[in-house]
Image (tube, helix red, strand yellow):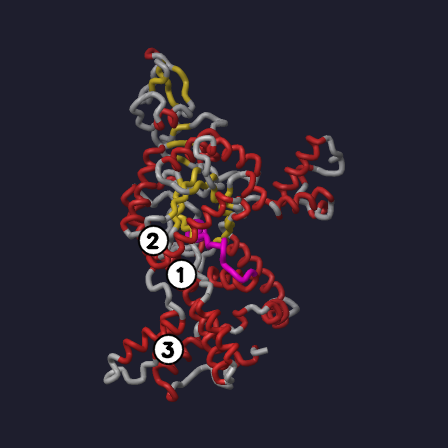
Amino acid sequence: MTYQQTIAEADRTISANTATWDGIDAQYVARMRLQNRFQTGLDIARYTAKIMRADMEAYDADPANYTQSLGCWHGFIGQQKLISIKKHFGTTKGRYLYLSGWMVAALRSEFGPLPDQSMHEKTSVPALVEELYTFLRQADARELSLLFRDLDKARAAGDEVEVKRIEHAIDNYDTHVVPIIADIDAGFGNAEATYLLAKKFIEAGACCIQIENQVSDEKQCGHQDGKVTVPHEDFLAKIRAVRYAFMELGIDDGVIVARTDSLGAGLTKQIAFTREPGDLADQYNSFLDCEEVDQSNLAHGDVLIARDGKLMRPKRLPSNLYQFRPGTGEDRCVMDCIASLQHGADLLWIETEKPHIAQIGGMVSRIREVIPNAKLVYNNSPSFNWTLNFRQQVYDAWEAEGRDVFGYDRARLMSIDYDDTDLAIEADERIRTFQSDSAREAGIFHHLITLPTYHTAALSTDDLARQYFGDLGMLGYVATVQRAEIRQGIACVKHQNMAGSDIGDDHKEYFAGEAALKAGGEHNTMNQFAA
């Protein structure tokens, strides 16, 4: 409904209760309704799932329509990202938020900072989903509040053209609420635990859940050693659990991202149960590192499997984990991805050790031989040294082409000494175009950075501490923070407004009329930033 239609509807209800609803203004009701468009997390999940599905279709039609997101660990961080996106680009189209389990573990656990090993409170993840959407909804309320104030000014001035312009802006308002890709780690337990937690995610507003194929109680960060994968049946049971959660709650188009850590995982906790030669479990077991044995050469406690009529002993570590053959990671990744897409997943995530388009694209090409529309979510991770990786890629390419690399030491390419060289300039250009190039050449639908605000918070705090506690004193804050906020038009320079003070004043007027005691009077120091 339009703004005027919403007023008319509210007025009909008020008119039917005129004897007791004295002082209720239909226009104010309409404003509050528009400022609270999404009343539940399921409303949000339903709305954002449609956005994400439409974006997936647009990408299938043209890979230039890839999408992006940044990870965040607090509702305010997510809010400010979307405010900045709307400010700089005029629309939120194609831009999401990513919720990283790593950042929840490191920054939100009651135990204090933890590694990415699923040791944090699992309910803290859906709690962050809810918090993010609370802040995004507040951003809508704040921005609409400013439009309503401008509308009142235009009416008071008798400027009908401006009134119509603002009413059009209200009716076509572009919300800050966007899809969140939410990290459920390895499901925090068995399939039932995954199902129960997925419901919490969805009820909080998540339309997209990312789950990985590691063993839940052995889970490691995707960019660290010691990763242990599960047989496909175990993983597919959790994918089905997430799908059931979506469908139970009426989000039939909810999105599941199946992540494989097999590229860097050389271990498994279980030998898969196989029903017949060549089935999915048998393929999983075929990658086990085994040696042939005979019955006269058995050790106490040996575990044996039959393969092609032979007795084989899988290599078992003292940790009771089984080892895969070296060099099988890519083959296992491809098998994982095909199985996931054939059994309920919508998107893939292949965790890699470096950002290399040829490596990713090679795996995606093999997957697309079976699933032609396979698409990836890709982690543009801060765990990669992007500068060194791309300078080395350029070095290797130049060397293969026979170009002169005599002046470069491949092992030292991170050095500042190379920053202005032709090699470094080409490497930076490849980094700049990495997302568009890999969207086109490697099937990547969504690019995200998992931990950006973890690093930006540390960097900006280091800069401020160095300047404020050093010789600059208060100028360290004023010059590099407040003055920069003013010059760049950062809304948070008016921090009282951002925190909701003006919305509160509006409500005081709705509730108390002329008797309202407002905070935004002439003595409010936020007026110093009016210019």
Looking at the image, is 325 positioned above or below residue 91?
Answer: above
* Residue 143 seen anywhere in this rendered image of the structure: no
What is the secondary structure assignment of the residue under circle 2? helix
The one nearer the camera, 337 or 473, is 337
Q: Is residue 267 left or right of residue 443?
A: left
Q: Residue 28 carries which label?
A: 3
Region in magenta: 89-105
User: Which corner quadrant of the image does residue 190 belong to?
Assistant: top left
Disc 1 or 2, which lies upstream in sequence?
A: 1
Residue 55 seen from this side: yes
Q: Tell me the amino acid under the disc marked 3.
A: Tyr
439 left or right of 115 in image: right
Measured in 3D between alpha carbons, the distance from the residue under mark 1 to the one under mark 3, in whole angstroms, is 23 Å
Question: What residue is shown at x 34% (from left), y 37% (from top)?
Answer: 236
Amino acid type of the residue that numbered disc 2 sits on in the rendered structure:
Ile
Figure quadrant of residue 24: bottom left
Q: In this view, does 66 lie to the left or right of 129?
A: right
Quarter holding the N terminus is bottom left
**Magenta span has 172?**
no
Q: Which of 44 and 172 is in front in this view?
A: 172
Mark toward the viewer: 1 or 3: 3
Looking at the picture, does residue 109 appear above or below residue 380?
A: below
Residue for point 73% across, 48% down: 420
Q: Is tag 1's residue or tag 3's residue first in the polypeptide sequence?
A: 3
**Residue under circle 1?**
133
Check contact, mark 1 vs mark 3: CB within 8 A. Answer: no
SS category of the residue bearing label 3: helix
Q: Which image quarter is the C terminus in?
A: bottom right
Q: Residue 404 at what x, y percent from top left?
A: 75, 34
Q: Position of residue 249 (x, y in %)?
A: 29, 52
| Residue carrying label 2 | 202
